[in-house]
Amino acid sequence: MGFIIAKFVLQYVLISPIYELHRDEFLHLDQAHHLAWGYESVPPVTSWISSIILLLGNSLFWIRFFPALFGALTIVVVWKAIEELKGNLFALILGATCVLFSVLLRLNGLYQPNSLDALCWTTFCFILIKYYNTQNSKWFYIGMVILAFGFLNKYNIVFLLVGILPALLLTNRSVFTDKNFYFSIILFSLLIMPNMIWQYNNDFPVFHHMQQLAREQLVNVNRWDFLKDQLLFFLGSLFVILAALYALLFYEPFKKYKFFFWTMCFTLMIFTTLKAKSYYALGLYPIYIAFGAVYLEIILKSNWKKYLQPVAILIPLLFFIPMYKIIFPIKSPDYIVNHSALYKKFGLLRWEDGKDHLLPQDFADMLGWKELANKIDAIYSAFPVQSKTIILCDNYGQAGAINYYTKNKNISAVAFSADYINWFRLDNKYDNLIRVKTLKNKENELKETSHFFETAYVADSISNSFAREYGTTIFVFMNAKVDINKRIKEEIDQEKKL
């Protein structure tokens, strides 16, 4: 309970109120208003959680609560895995400390599928330990339920499977001779079937999303940086993870779990080959902390070595203290700019475009949104009540932020990006258009669009120079001369074809 309470407290205090929600969080929260078995960006589980958050009031407290909960449950699963591996108090405390004071504090600070993804990876690995300890086939079915839920949360868990299956073929082929293994696969298939049907009916947007990701973001990923980040993520726990890998190879009681060693090798090799983002592999490590904690308890329990146990527990905390100032959004943008050398040293200023910027990308993605929504509210309130106005944005962050922060219940912003392309409401005939354009896309907006309306002007822009959306401009077009709905429908069809 102490570790769980500490986890929740830290998740709430490690984000400064200077920062707002992250652009991805707005999209996930908006999915609660458009429930489906799939989305352009993620599978459906996130929308279910968003629905709960909406029922609870959609407040910041509950948005922060659920990723913190998944992080706390990850600690619980590691604790249970240590007990399953016959670890005692020292191993339990060491394992929980390593998981608590790790990069998972950063991961669990944002409302994204990643927190639940890490929990599902850890839980599925724990189920494998239970199976090999009991040889009870019921764990096949429990494992497949966990795996299906993880799949419906984030497709990333497929890479864990791709790593585990060859590892099992290499070391534990007996699992493939049990008929329950194949029956459990049928259960898994049935559980994910609604999402697969949705993907089929929508021309498998997951492949489009992956191609776009590879083209726009992963192309800038350096394989060496990926491997370097793996060391930094659990730097204070690295000695525990290395102890786990050694034990999985040479410690006799862990011989039946040897496939976990090869699972890490295969999974990291696949991620490295595909130039994956560094955090994709985060869910892999917690279960190894369980193995390492138990093994260290064995070798540190006799004679003078037992005095090293408190030192081992302190190491994750000591490594965490100097890191927390730079990897969490607790410092003001001014402070970060004035101490940029420190952030640059750890590569934190490099964005997905491969270039260095003023702030870490995630921090810049948490600024400017309230300003945008407030300015949209002010502009919208000046429109005639009887007229119909559509707010069209350049990206999902803008649309989601406006929908979340707006004080006007009639406002519903959309965009041609991500899931918003399916959420246009074209049943009303629109008279006016509020166009939100990013700095790099705004040049010709007035020239290209103004002749379709009687009135056109630049209304405002985001002035926060630290925000990733700095310079994003709000254009106003009033009293349409053409059928806006028809033109938007044509653009939607064109975007979907592309």
Image (tube, rainbow, N blue to C red):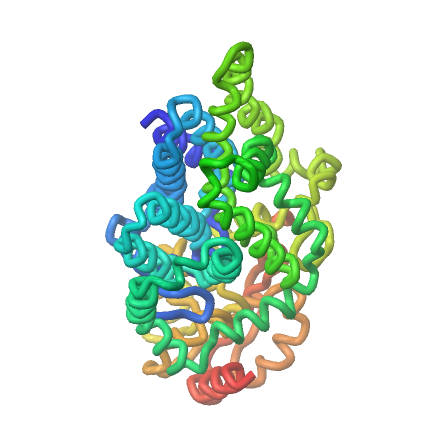
Q: Hey, which quadrant is residue 129 in on the image?
A: top left
Q: Position of residue 273 (x, y in %)?
A: 65, 61
Q: Which quadrant is home to the N terminus?
A: top left
Q: Is residue 374 above or below residue 15?
A: below
Say which quarter of the image contains residue 388: bottom left
Is residue 187 visible in the rendered image? The answer is yes
Q: Is residue 46 at least partly visible in the picture?
A: no
Residue shown at 43% from the left, 30% from the top? 96
Residue 316 pos. (x, y %):
55, 27
Q: Is residue 169 left or right of residue 355?
A: left
Give the quadrant of the C terminus: bottom right
Front position in the image: 112 or 245? 245
Residue shown at 62% from the left, 45% from the top: 230
Can you say whether 34 is above or below 142 in the image?
below
Please determine whether, in this image, residue 227 is positioned above or below residue 340: below
Q: Is residue 163 found left or right of 411 in the rendered image?
A: right
Q: Position of residue 427 (x, y in %)?
A: 32, 82
Residue drawn 51% across and 27% down?
A: 296
Horizontally, residue 92 falls left or right of residue 495, namely left
Q: Residue at x 34, y 49 (%)?
A: 131
Towards the viewer: 79 or 167 = 167
